[in-house]
Image (spheres, helix red, strand yellow):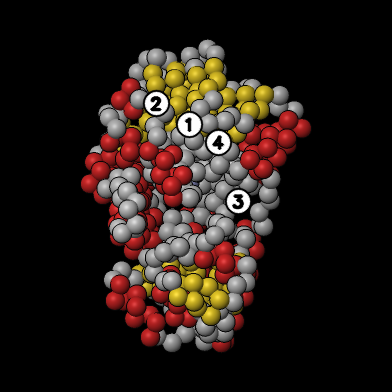
C-alpha cells in the first residue's frame, strides 16, 4: 500500500490523495483549491497523475474543497466511478452545478473587465455541462456496506458527522486498514451524531483544521441567538445572517424554530434567501430518516415535526421576492449567502440596511482575510459594496459557537478511541500552525509515527 498526498496538505482546501493498494489506484477526494485567483486556477488545472490510469474515486463529502475538482478529472479522461453516500450525491448535484456556474460567471466578468488591457482571456475550469457529465459517474454507497473494488481492495464508509452524508473512508487491502477521516465532525453538534469509531485501523489520515483550538460549547448557541433576536425584535430591526448554504443554514433554522416553538423568543418572520440553501434544505427534508442525525434531533423531529417546514420560515427563490424584502419593515431575520459576504443576495440586504443602527449583522462562520465579512467583523465603519462606499451604522456580532469541524479536544478523543491497533498517523487539511500544534499534541500523547506530509510526498505503507 502506498499513499501520495496531492492536496490539502499545509492548507485546508484541495483535499486529494492517491492510494495505490491491492493492485488498484484510487483517489480519496478530489477537491478544488481555493484562494487567490491566479494561484488557485494554476493549482486546479494541474493534475500531477494520469486521470485515465485511475481505477476508482471515493468521495468523503459534498463540500467543494473535497468534490470540486471532480469535473476536471472526468474532463481529463477519468472513466471510473465516483463512490459516495446518497446524500453526498444529491448535495453534489446542487453544489457542483453552483461551482460551475460561479466559474463561468467569474471568467465572463474577468474577461469583460480586462478586454481592453491585452490580457489573455481566462476559461472557466469547467462548465455546467461538464459538471453534469461528471455527476453521471457518481455511484452511491451506504455507510457500513463494504464495496469490493477489485484486486484485494475493499472500501467501507462510516459516518464522519461533519455535514449531511459525510463519510470517513476505510480502505482494506494488503493486510492493512487505512482510515481517511475526510472532514470530521464534533462530539457534540446541533444536528449530527458524533463521528463513528471504526475498529482495527492501523493507518490514519486525519484532518487538522482546528488542531490547536477549542470551540465554545455548543450549548451556548441557544442563549446567544435568543439575546440577538430579542433585541432586534424590541428595536424592530433586521437581523442579516450571511450563512453557508450547507449545514450552517439548517442548524440556525433548527435552533430558531426550537426557540420559537417553545415560546422562548417572540414571533419573528424568517427568510431563507438563497436558492442554493433552499435546494439543500430540500435534501435535508428527504433524509429525515436517521441518516446521520443525532438521536436528540431525531427525537425532536418525531415529537414536534420537521423543523425545516416550520410555518414562519419563508423560502425565497425569485430575485424579485428577494428585492421586495427591502421594502418590508423589521423585525425579521434574513439568512442569505454567501457566508463571507463575497457575493450573492446578502450584498443587496447589506447595502440597504448597513446604515441603520437597528440592523444586526450576525456572523456565524469563518471570515477569511480580505473578505467583506472580515471587514465588518473587525469593525470598519465604511465598506465597499458593489464598488461603492457604504456607511456602517449596524451592529456587527460574531458567534464562534458554530463549527462543523472537530476541535483539538474532539480530534484527540477520536484518535484515542481508535485503540492500540493504530500505528501511523498522517495530518492533512490544516494550516501549518494548526497542523504542527496537533502533531505536537499527538507526540506528547505517545504516538510515535505522526507525519505532516508535503505536496506530492509519497509514503510506502507496507503490506
Ligand atoms: Zn467539509
Ligand atoms: Zn474540508
Residue placed farthest to the right in the image? 444
Left or right of 117 in this view: 396: right
The location of residue 327, given as percent across then percent down, is 38, 86
Q: Decide: few, some or many residues near mark 3? Use Cα within 10 Å; few <14, some 14-19, many ≥20.
A: some
Q: Earlier in the sequence, mark 3 or mark 4?
A: 4
Earlier in the chain: of badge 2 and badge 3, it is 2
Q: Secondary structure at mark 4?
A: loop
* Label number found at residue 6: 1
Which tag is nearer the camera, tag 3 or tag 4? 4
Q: Position of residue 145 (x, y in %)?
A: 40, 31
Could you classify mark 1 by the number of other residues whose Cα lies within 10 Å: few (under 14), some (14-19), or many (20 or more)?
Answer: many
Q: Nearer the viewer, residue 387 or 200?
A: 387
Residue at image coords 33%, 34% = 73
Spatial separation of the CA atoms under disc 2 and disc 3:
39 Å
Which residue is rendered at x = 31% and y = 76% of the image?
321
Identify the residue under disc 3: 188
The residue singled out by tag 4 in the image is 9
Between 401 and 369, the residue placed more toward the observer is 369
Question: Contact, CB < 8 Å: mark 3 with mark 4?
Answer: no
Mark 1 or 2, nearer chain start: 1
User: CA–CA distance between discs 1 and 3?
Assistant: 31 Å
Q: Is residue 299 visible?
A: no
With respect to residue 229, does 234 lie above or below?
below
Looking at the image, which residue is at 38% across and 80% down?
Answer: 325
The answer to whether the beta carbon of the residue marked 3 is less than 8 Å from any atom of ligand 1 is no
Q: Is residue 348 visible?
A: yes
Ligand 2 within 8 angstroms of badge 1 C-beta: no
Q: What label does residue 49 carry, if any?
A: 2
Closer-to-camera residue (60/433)? 433
Give yes or no for contact between labels 1 and 2 (Cβ–Cβ under 8 Å).
Answer: yes
Amino acid at each position: 500500500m502506498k499513499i501520495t498526498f496531492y492536496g490539502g496538505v499545509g492548507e485546508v482546501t484541495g483535499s486529494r490523495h492517491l492510494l495505490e493498494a491491492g493492485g488498484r489506484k484510487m483517489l480519496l477526494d478530489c477537491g478544488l483549491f481555493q484562494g487567490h485567483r491566479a494561484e488557485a486556477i494554476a493549482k486546479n488545472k494541474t493534475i500531477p497523475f494520469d486521470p485515465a490510469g485511475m481505477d476508482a474515486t471515493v468521495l468523503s463529502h459534498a463540500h467543494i474543497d473535497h468534490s470540486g475538482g471532480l469535473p476536471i478529472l472526468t474532463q481529463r479522461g477519468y472513466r471510473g466511478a465516483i463512490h459516495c453516500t446518497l446524500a453526498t450525491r444529491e448535495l453534489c448535484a446542487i453544489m457542483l452545478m453552483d461551482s460551475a456556474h460561479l466559474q463561468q460567471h467569474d471568467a465572463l466578468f474577468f474577461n469583460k473587465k480586462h478586454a481592453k488591457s491585452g490580457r489573455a482571456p481566462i476559461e472557466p475550469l469547467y462548465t455546467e455541462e461538464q459538471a453534469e457529465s461528471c455527476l453521471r459517474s457518481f455511484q452511491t454507497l451506504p455507510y457500513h456496506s463494504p464495496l469490493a473494488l477489485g484486486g484485494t481492495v475493499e472500501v467501507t464508509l462510516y459516518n464522519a458527522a461533519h455535514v449531511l452524508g459525510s463519510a470517513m473512508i476505510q480502505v482494506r487491502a494488503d493486510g492493512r486498514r487505512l482510515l481517511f477521516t475526510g472532514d470530521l465532525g464534533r462530539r457534540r453538534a446541533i444536528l449530527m451524531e458524533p463521528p463513528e469509531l471504526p475498529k482495527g485501523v492501523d493507518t490514519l489520515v486525519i484532518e487538522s483544521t482546528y488542531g490547536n483550538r477549542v470551540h465554545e460549547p455548543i450549548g451556548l448557541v441557544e442563549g446567544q441567538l435568543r439575546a440577538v433576536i430579542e433585541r432586534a425584535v424590541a428595536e424592530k430591526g433586521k437581523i442579516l445572517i450571511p450563512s453557508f448554504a450547507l449545514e450552517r443554514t439548517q442548524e440556525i433554522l433548527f435552533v430558531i424554530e426550537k426557540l420559537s416553538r417553545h415560546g422562548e423568543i417572540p414571533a419573528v418572520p424568517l427568510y431563507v434567501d438563497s436558492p442554493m440553501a433552499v435546494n439543500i434544505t430540500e435534501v435535508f427534508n428527504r433524509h429525515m430518516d436517521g441518516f446521520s442525525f443525532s438521536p436528540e434531533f431525531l427525537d425532536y423531529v418525531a415529537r414536534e415535526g420537521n423543523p425545516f417546514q416550520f410555518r414562519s420560515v419563508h423560502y425565497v427563490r425569485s430575485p424579485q421576492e428577494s428585492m421586495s424584502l427591502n421594502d418590508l419593515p423589521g423585525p425579521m431575520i434574513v439568512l442569505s449567502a454567501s457566508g463571507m459576504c463575497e457575493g450573492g443576495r446578502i450584498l443587496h440586504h447589506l447595502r440597504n440596511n448597513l446604515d441603520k443602527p437597528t440592523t444586526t449583522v450576525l456572523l456565524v462562520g469563518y471570515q477569511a482575510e480580505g473578505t467583506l465579512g472580515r471587514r465588518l467583523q473587525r469593525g470598519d465603519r465604511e465598506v465597499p459594496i458593489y464598488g461603492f462606499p457604504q456607511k456602517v451604522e449596524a451592529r456587527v456580532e460574531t458567534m464562534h459557537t458554530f463549527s462543523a469541524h472537530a476541535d483539538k479536544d474532539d480530534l484527540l478523543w477520536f484518535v484515542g478511541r481508535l485503540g492500540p491497533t493504530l500505528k501511523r498517523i498522517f495530518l492533512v487539511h490544516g494550516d501549518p500552525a494548526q497542523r504542527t500544534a496537533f502533531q505536537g499534541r499527538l507526540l506528547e500523547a505517545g504516538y510515535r509515527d505522526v507525519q505532516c506530509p508535503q505536496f506530492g510526498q509519497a509514503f510506502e505503507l507496507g503490506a
